[in-house]
Image (cartoon, grey):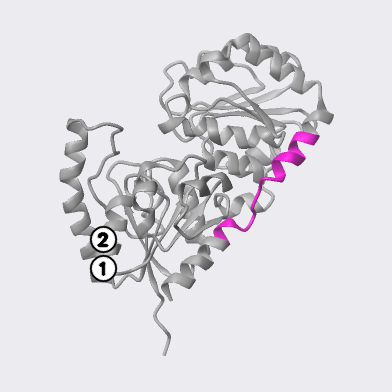
């Protein structure tokens, strides 16, 4: 008689920074029946249902200060927790894995009520509020940056970096007409795009193309001026499915500094000009970027300090310095933990079986 698979609830919602690491861990847990907890009308509703049964709860982000929005969240937590408790009991779920964010709150509270373990992964150098508030109720806190350990002096922590999808661990080809010997600059603003970065790039991109580079610019879906610049060697897309292949081919990137993006850059050994999102909670992207810069894998500019002329000159200098880029690529690779998803999957197994 075939043994039944253990059952796991994954709570991950919102942006790619939360979802893609969770999906990478799910890929490693083929020996589990996986259920997914998310929020209506967020990215998980596109990425998850074809692979895992998705349950949604109405819960929003925690505000920094007490306000009407905070009160609204507090009223939504109890019914969300009740729904998750019901889900856990109905399917006899044996553990929870979550990647932080506000969806973690009802998941951790429900697991606490049901007496099952929670493994939480915190990808950022400055942990999110929910992770800090509820870490004491988690079996293990897996960390994306070793420096985040100082926030959890009493918890069981392990540094595993941030999981990436399996596609990043094998060679991928591109369906773009870019010569093999041409330098390729990839511009990526994270899963939400970055309109301000897009405009900086469009202001000066012609100078890079004139220098012989090709540019793939991922603009996001919120940029009204997406077609403002056109050139045969300039590709502008709202998003691109094959990020692994794109970064593997890139000479270097211009990017936000989300933890997931930095991990993908490290795995693909891609030097980067980093422009941290200035409104990230507690400025965590700036702290993330510092780690990348500290080892010599890139440079970081505050968005408010970065002019189009400064960006133009930096890129042109990099295009003229292949030896420098090769050294930066090697330094980026030193930050990669290639078996991160596998390590987390093993922690889940140890806690739930």
Q: Residue at horizontal 65%, vertical 20%?
A: 232
Look at the numbered discs 1 and 2 and tell me whether their residues touch, using CB distance below 8 Å. yes
Residue 91 in the image, given as x and y percentages of width and height? 28, 71
Q: Position of residue 320 (x, y in %)?
A: 81, 20
Label 1: few (<14), some (14–19) or many (≥20) C-alpha neighbours in 10 Å? some
Residue 191 among those drawn in magenta: no
Please tell me the numbered disc located at residue 114: 1
Q: Quadrant of residue 11?
A: bottom left
Q: Position of residue 219 (x, y in %)?
A: 50, 26
Give the residue drawn at x 51%, y 15%: 304
Quick one: quadrant of the C terminus?
A: bottom left
Query: Relative to 224, does residue 106 appear above or below in the rendering?
Result: below
Q: Which residues are magenta?
A: 327-342
The quarter of the displayed image where residue 204 is located: top right
Residues 114 and 204: in front is 114
User: For the point 48% across and 30% down, which residue is it?
Assistant: 238
Residue 110: assigned label: 2
Which quarter of the image is occupied by the N terminus? bottom left
| Residue 229 makes an appearance in the image | no
Q: Nearer the viewer, residue 2 or 88?
A: 88
């Amino acid at each position: 008689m075939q043994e039944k698979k253990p059952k796991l609830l994954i709570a991950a919602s919102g942006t790619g920074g939360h979802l893609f690491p969770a999906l990478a861990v799910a890929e490693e847990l083929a020996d589990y029946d996986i259920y997914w907890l998310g929020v209506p009308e967020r990215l998980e509703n596109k990425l998850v249902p074809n692979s895992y049964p998705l349950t949604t709860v109405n819960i929003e982000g925690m505000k920094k200060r007490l306000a009407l929005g905070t009160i609204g969240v507090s009223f939504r937590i109890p019914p969300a927790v009740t729904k998750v408790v019901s889900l856990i009991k109905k399917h006899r779920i044996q553990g929870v894995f979550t990647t932080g964010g506000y969806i973690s709150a009802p998941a951790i509270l429900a697991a606490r009520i049901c007496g099952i373990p929670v493994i939480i992964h915190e990808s950022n150098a400055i942990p999110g509020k929910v992770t800090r508030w509820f870490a004491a109720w988690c079996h293990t806190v897996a960390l994306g940056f070793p420096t985040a350990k100082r926030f959890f002096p009493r918890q069981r922590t392990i540094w595993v970096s941030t999981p990436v999808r399996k596609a990043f661990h094998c060679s991928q080809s591109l369906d773009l007409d870019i010569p093999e010997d041409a330098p390729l600059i990839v511009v990526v603003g994270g899963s939400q795009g970055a309109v301000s970065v897009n405009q900086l790039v469009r202001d000066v991109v012609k100078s890079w193309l004139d220098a012989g580079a090709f540019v793939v610019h991922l603009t996001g879906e919120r940029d009204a001026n997406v077609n403002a610049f056109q050139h045969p060697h300039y590709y502008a897309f709202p998003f691109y499915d094959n990020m692994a292949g794109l970064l593997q081919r890139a000479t270097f990137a211009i990017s936000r500094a989300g933890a997931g993006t930095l991990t993908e850059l490290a795995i693909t050994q891609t030097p980067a000009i980093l422009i941290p999102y200035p409104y990230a909670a507690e400025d965590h992207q700036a702290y993330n970027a510092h780690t990348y810069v500290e080892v010599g894998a890139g440079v970081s500019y505050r968005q408010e300090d970065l002019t189009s002329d400064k960006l133009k000159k930096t890129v042109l200098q990099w295009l003229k310095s292949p030896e420098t880029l090769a050294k930066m690529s090697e330094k980026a690779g030193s930050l990669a933990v290639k078996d991160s998803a596998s390590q987390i999957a093993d922690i889940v197994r140890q806690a739930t079986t």
